[in-house]
Image (cartoon, rainbow, N blue to C red):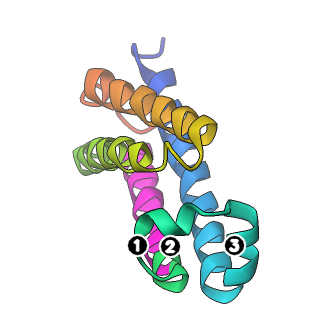
Amino acid sequence: MEKKGTGVLMFAWVVFLILGCFNIIQGLIAVFRSSDWIRVFGNLHRITLVEVKTAGWIIIIWGLIELAAAGSIAKGAQFGRWLGIIIAGLGIIGWFFYLPAAPLWSIMLIALYAWVLHGLVVYGGTHERIGE
């Protein structure tokens, strides 16, 4: 029998894997093909008040941190839980800044990060490795 919350933690793990990969790809596009990034994401870069390539490197680093959290959550480490809580909290705050430029996308990601945050806070301390 699985421990309570294993599914929620697996969901957090998968979300961090997907968002980490997505952010790395998005950051690479911003760094190497900034005109394509601006065409796809519109005026989002104007909200950040940084150069598109700089924002791209920040997004790549953010994606790598999300992948590190995913790996640590999968191993059952408390480091991953706390890193995931910090990432989800900062993600919620960060996407509030993008509400004027991309309201639907921002609300969706705020809700996703909030769901992950809830799962890590409520069930994060009660599991071993995911899949065992």
Q: Amino acid at mark 2?
A: Ile
Main SS, magenta region, reads helix
Label 3 vs 2, first from the N-terminus:
3
Q: Amino acid at mark 1?
A: Leu
Drawn side of residue 36 relative to residue 4, left or right? right
Magenta segment boundaries in residue numbering: 57-75
Which residue matches tag 1?
Answer: 49
Q: Tag 3, which secondary structure?
A: helix
Which residue matches tag 3?
Answer: 37
Q: Is residue 132 visible?
A: no
Which residue matches tag 2?
Answer: 60
Residue 31 in picture, x, y percent from top left: 60, 85
Front residue of 108 and 117: 108
Residue 23 in picture, x, y percent from top left: 57, 62
Q: How many marks?
A: 3
Q: Nearer the viewer, mark 3 or mark 1?
A: 1
